[in-house]
Amino acid sequence: MAMATYAATTTTMVLVVVLSISTIVPVAMADAGFIATTCNKTHNAKCVAVLTANPDSADASTVSDLAGVALDLAVAAASDAGAVINDRSSRYGGGTPEGDALRACSGAYFDAANDLDIDAHDSLGSGDYAAASRLVSGAGGAADTCDAAFAAAKVSSVMADVDQKMKDRCSVARDLINLLIKFPPTDN
């Protein structure tokens, strides 16, 4: 009798685990589908890759949620750029073309991080999507400023990878915020 009870309990546990897994999988697939459908509306080829690389995107259920995640990613890219600039600045002394270019990059990325983290978040949170979009676009210009500083110094950029990441993150955030301008969320 004890063996029959054990077998029944084991079968029930396996069934519960299988049912639990089967209910989780469609949710994850629905999240990926929501991200892909939303990104399709932006016509931004980097959108899906940028968002799916961040686990927070899986919790998003609205365009506004995705825009917030994308904005957070842009803030992180700008902040990370500051750390990279500090690290790379230690390799180049002041007065070198690379060091001077990195100083220009530092100022641009510092301003971008502040604009994104403070002003763009406030604008997005208050529903001023046009202002948020302008701020994100402007912050994305930090990468262009950095590129231009290296071009003016006539040296290869040691920030090209960071600049591209910033451009990608800001363009995705801007495009998702622009969807909110076209299709404002309704408060139900």
Image: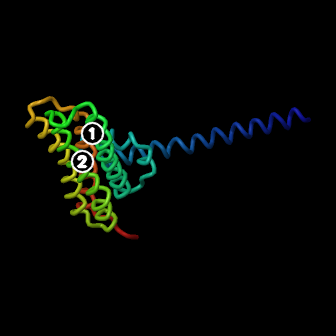
- The Cα–Cα distance between marks 1 and 2, rounded to whole angstroms, is 9 Å
Q: Circle 1 — which element? A: helix
Residue ID for mark 1: 85
Looking at numbered disc 2 in the image, what kind of residue is underneath it? Tyr
Q: Which mark is residue 109?
A: 2
Please state, as top left, top right, bottom left or bottom right, where the N terminus lies in the image: top right
Residue 15 vs 137, above or below: the answer is above
Q: Residue at x 32, y 41 (%)?
A: 83
Q: Position of residue 106 (x, y in %)?
A: 23, 45
Q: Position of residue 115 (x, y in %)?
A: 26, 57
Residue 92 vs 22, above or below: the answer is above
Q: Position of residue 188 (x, y in %)?
A: 40, 70
Tell which tag, 1 or 2, sits nearer the viewer: 1
Image-quadrant location for residue 15? top right
Q: Residue at x 33, y 54 (%)?
A: 67
Looking at this view, name the residue that lies furthest to the right.
Answer: 1
**Label whose residue precedes the other's in the sequence (1 or 2):** 1
Horizontally, residue 19 falls left or right of residue 106, namely right
Q: Position of residue 174 (x, y in %)?
A: 24, 52
- Tell me, yes or no, whether the two marked residues, 1 and 2, touch with CB atoms within 8 Å: yes
Pick whichever, 56 or 118, lies toward us. Answer: 118
Q: Residue at x 31, y 44 (%)?
A: 77
Pick whichever, 12 or 59, lies toward us. Answer: 59
Residue 6 vs 24, above or below: the answer is above
Looking at numbered disc 1 in the image, what kind of residue is underneath it? Ile
Residue 33 vs 159, above or below: the answer is below
